[in-house]
Image: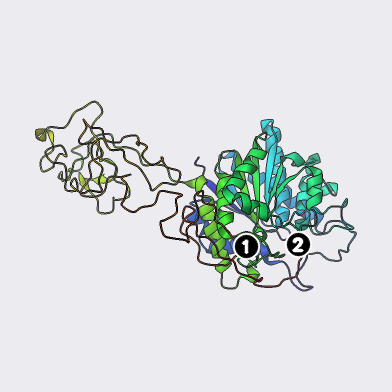
Amino acid sequence: MNRRIAILDAPSNLGLRPPTATSVPGCAKAPGALRDHGLVERLDARDTGCLTPPRYDPADWRPGDGVCHAPAIARYSMALAERIGAIIDAGEFPVILGGDCSILLGSALAMHRLGEAVGGRIGLVFVDGHSDFRHPGNASYVGAAAGEDLALVTGRGQADLAAIEGRRPYFRDIDVVVLGIRTQDEYRLDLQAAGIVTRTVPMLRTEGAARTAQWAHDQLADCAGYWVHVDVDVLDPAVMPAVDAPDPGGIAFTELELLIAGLVDTPHCLGIEITVFDPDYDPDGSYAAEIVATLVAGLSPVHRPEPAPEPAGPVWIGAPARAPGRDPVEDPPGVRGGAPAADDRAVRPSVAMPQGAGPVAPEEAPEGSTALGPENPGPAAANSTQPTPGDPVVDVSVVGGPAVGAPVVGAPVADDPVAGAPVGGDPVAGAPVAGAPVAGDPVAGDPAVAPVGGDPAVAPAAVAASARPASVADVPVVAASGGVARAMMRRR
């Protein structure tokens, strides 16, 4: 499932209370901080720019006045819905960089419009450290939309935000899945009473991040698609303190990576938004770098590269370069001018015979070339690590590849000595490498590798901010550590 990723900045901080009387919330700087670490380039994404929010100015707001900045949030939500809809209409996968959680209203409005257009319901996977379910029915007053966004998008609250364009609710309660809230969340019982399914952090850890993503997908099987909301405060403050309301007991970066990868690895996932990261609490940029690395790995199912095409004919080793204009046949991938390029190890295809033909006679080879066959098996044919005719070739380099011992399409057969022969002494593409682990299996003797399934066994107390793994497949177990990196006042 390959879709072009389109990144849009939505740096609104209108849904948060001011951190002090003379400052504004810093999450408006989050898109820029993530871009500084190469997010757009590393995702090979289309840059769709920035939707500039209205001015942050709570003025003389007082409790009892309703949601602060409500008219400005409503206008911004309609504009954001237009931009998200245009990205989806172009067949692309939107990644929205917030901003605070109030941008969910714009995403929700876009999803409701889309559901109406396709004649189906759109669901929501809400990955957040807090339920954000405060509304006039369960609280003495409301005020900060970033602490009330889930209530608003499910139709609870003042009409100018909960019923924009007369659409109410944007998501039905049965079409919402909440992941990552803390066990002690003050509105957890309200979610349960509404019929909104949840998995708290302990439950998520018990089942594993990858299986939890599949469970969430199964809960929304009746929907035409779903949107993913990620508030980075779902992470434990020991590894991500740069948020407005850090709350102990969160998940690890590796768990978030696996969760995102499982949620987006389906055409039913329509897009994702990232919210609440505050660069004001990240002076050296280390937390921004971790978020970018997590997003690049987690979104890899969306933008995984297409496999290289098979060559149309046999590949000749050592043939002289062709003069320009003398041969209309193009060189196959990985071979330029009849000779292998020095940097073609990763892209050189296996040598294959033309369909329906037997071994090529030596006199048919171009002058100065060598045909690989039974009489000339190639320089690496005697290597004990290379496959022999009739042996299955197992590709261990691809996550989710064939099971061990399963033959791969195009594997050599006994009467085809040329197919699968090594090129220029390099190992055949897809051949097993001595000592290489099969994707998803733990490396023998290495206790820091995640168990089969890719779900790290993370201690529930807190999570240490250690160096992150190179890929989802090799996820180290994250050791437990205590304490919150920085105490901050809750501003929702």
- Residue at image location 80% in from the left, 54% down from the top: 187
Residue 107 screen position, x and y as percent:
69, 47
Residue found farthest to the top: 356
315 lies left or right of 109: left
Q: How is the image coloured?
A: rainbow
368 lies left or right of 422: left
Secondary-structure class at tag 1: helix
Question: What is the number of the mark on residue 30?
Answer: 1
355 lies left or right of 263: left
As displayed, is residue 441 above or below residue 26?
A: above
Q: Is residue 87 visible?
A: yes
- Mark 2, residues whose alpha carbon is within 10 Å: few (<14), some, or many (≥20)? many
Q: Is residue 172 visible?
A: no
| Three-letter amino acid code of the residue under disc 1 | Ala
Near-viewer residue (293 or 443)? 443
Near-viewer residue (331 or 290)? 290
Give residue 431's quadrant in the image: top left
- Looking at the image, is mark 2 or mark 1 earlier in the sequence? 2
Tell me the distance, in whole angstroms, between the alpha carbons under discs 2 and 1: 14 Å
Residue 12 screen position, x and y as percent:
70, 58
Near-viewer residue (321 or 20)? 20
The residue to which callout 2 is attached is 16
As displayed, is residue 468 above or below residue 149?
A: below
Secondary-structure class at tag 2: loop
Residue 490 screen position, x and y as percent:
76, 66
Residue 404 screen position, x and y as percent:
38, 42
